Amino acid sequence: MGIDNTDIANMHWQHDLLSSIEVGIVVLDREFNVEVWNQFMENHSSVRPRQINGKNLFEFFPDLDKAWFTRKCEPVFSMRSPAFIIWEQRPYVFKFGTSRPITSTSDVMYQNVTIFPLASLTGKVDKVCVLVYDVTDQALAKQNIEGLNERLREVSRVDGLTGLFNRRYWQERFEREFKMALRHNPPMCAIMLDIDHFKKVNDTYGHHAGDLVIQRLAKLVKLATRETDIPGRYGGEEFAVVLPDTTEKNAFIVAERLRKLVSLDAVQYEDIEIKFTVSIGIAQFLPKYKRSTQWLEDADKALYYAKEHGRNRVALISKIDELKE
């Protein structure tokens, strides 16, 4: 029996529908042989339906993780339960180039994919339909927003002149470390330091030169501390550092190293070499501190003791307290 005109008409509109829809449509049997491959899939893969129909999907797409894709399809076949793959979990199933290669910032097409069962007249699921949605624009927009939010968070945390944490965010981190210290009482030290005779630097060479000195000190602070330490610009020419898991003895070694680095360094400003020094105060965390401000105030007291007793030196609050006794 031949194909009548009604069958031809049905085949024609079905072909037009599959060709015009802006979604990838793939029908697979249980062996993952391709039975339907629409125009969207042809356009983005350069594989024509007559090339792939009746052939195994994985032969044409060796980059497609066969074990993973098979696992995703198994419950669709066995339990008649649709499966969903979103680009946040896996950027794409089929590695297609972006649909707008000139204007897009992505080289690949981000995809959301739905796999749903196709039952026969007997109710048995022996085919699945894979729908591929191009969500590149949405994915890039979300990534751009997330990137912008991250940059805004970074800007809100960082001091613009030095690149260290600003005072507000440093105090948040300091408060967090203080609360942890109250619970576990680990060895931990707070350091306060500032530039000796900084007003003289500004008055003599100008504020731009003063900014260069502050920037140089920030770099030396980074150089002298570990990645786990928490340095920040506390205000003006004053800096603060938290040294986690650090005894007073080791904090003194760190502070002395920094003090010596600064004293041997200089800032080149125009044809002038500007030498400067710092004074440093240290307070180790003690259980007697009921508020974080008490701990920081002790580090500040040690700093001013260092300044009042000659500058360019490191002072420990514990030694000052011993002298008072």
Image (cartoon, rainbow, N blue to C red):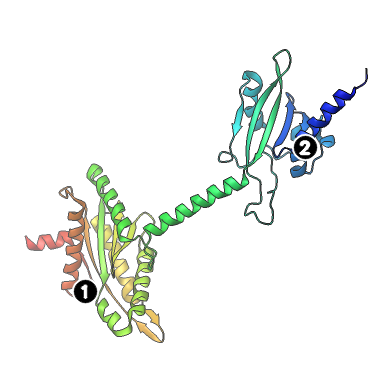
The answer to whether the residues at label 2 and label 1 have Cβ atoms under 8 Å apart is no
The residue drawn where x is 60% and y is 31% is 84
Q: Please tell me whether mark 2 or mark 1 is closer to you in this view.
A: 2
Can residue 101 be seen here? The reply is yes
Q: In the image shown, does 177 or 74 lie closer to the viewer? A: 74
Helix, strand, or loop for circle 1? loop
Q: In the image shown, does 36 or 235 lie closer to the viewer? A: 36
Q: Is residue 213 left or right of residue 15?
A: left
The numbered mark, 2 or 1, whose residue comes first in the sequence reads: 2
The residue where tag 2 is placed is 19
Q: Is residue 244 left or right of residue 2?
A: left
The residue drawn where x is 16% and y is 72% is 308
Percent coordinates x, y for residue 120 in the rendering: 73, 17
Distance from disc 2 to disc 1, alpha carbons, whole Å, reads: 81 Å
Of the residues shown, which amino acid type is indicated by label 1? Arg
The residue where tag 1 is placed is 311
Percent coordinates x, y for residue 97 in the rendering: 70, 48
Q: Count residues near mark 1 (Cα–Cα under 10 Å), then give few for <14, some for 14-19, many for 20+.
A: many
Q: In the image shown, does 103 or 192 lie closer to the viewer? A: 103
**Number of marks drawn:** 2
